[in-house]
Amino acid sequence: MNKIAHTYLPVLQCGNCVLVPMTVDLVNSDYVGWLNDPRINSFLETRFNNNTLESVKSFVEHQISTESVLFYAIFSNTHNHIGNIKLGPINFAHLHADIGFLIGDEAYWGQGIATSAISALVKYGFSIGLKKITAGAYETNIGSIKALEKSGFRKEGLMEKQVLHDNLRVGAYIFGLTN
């Protein structure tokens, strides 16, 4: 498996969403708003940042220029950009990567879109030669835990009191899925 050029990433069809390779043009005030909204970013490390249009554009530019990252926008079937999903960085020596995702538009929460997006990107990751994909989730992030488990991931461990969430120390699960 060699490095991957972002410009050659395919569009991935899901049952209830479409994954489109991310571009800087998709960064707008709605996207930045997701990252700054305490309800939406509650389980994201980005909640500790002051996200601006410029900083998010810079982040996206970096991700799409990195040959070990597959970064996608999640679109609803009504063609709205509703979130993002990323596979990477890919470890090309050991053929594994981490997956992370965000459904930023709350109107689409609880509809199985994260599960569909995860499943589609995992399938693609395995098709290009990955042997294992991992993910993390705070033990209090029930939505992400359900989406990962429905996508076939299993809990491999719990790092107790690993992170701060709502002013409490909580654990963080490590999930894994092998090909």
Image (cartoon, grey):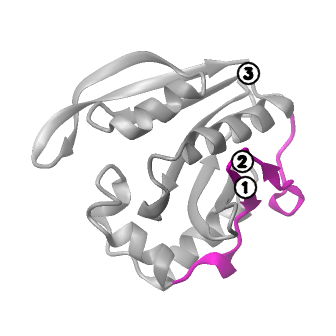
Residue ranking furthest to the left: 167
Q: Find disc 1 in the rendering and name its residue.
A: 19
Q: Find disc 3 in the rendering and name its residue.
A: 131
Q: Give residue 161's quadrant in the image.
A: top left
Residue nearest the observer in this picture, 123 or 111: 111
Amino acid carrying label 3: it is Lys
| Marker count (numbered) | 3
Q: Position of residue 59 (x, y in %)?
A: 55, 69
- The mark found on residue 68 in the picture is 2
Q: Nearer the viewer, mark 1 or mark 3?
A: 1
Give the mark nearer the N terminus: 1 vs 3. Answer: 1
The structure residue drawn at horizontal position 70% and vertical position 65%, both measured from the top left corner, is: 22
* Span shown in magenta: 1-28
Amino acid carrying label 2: it is Ser
The structure residue drawn at horizontal position 67% and vertical position 49%, both measured from the top left corner, is: 16
Q: Position of residue 18 (x, y in %)?
A: 73, 55
Crowdedness near tag 3: few (<14), some (14–19) or many (≥20) residues, C-alpha within 10 Å: some
The structure residue drawn at horizontal position 58% and vertical position 78%, both measured from the top left corner, is: 27
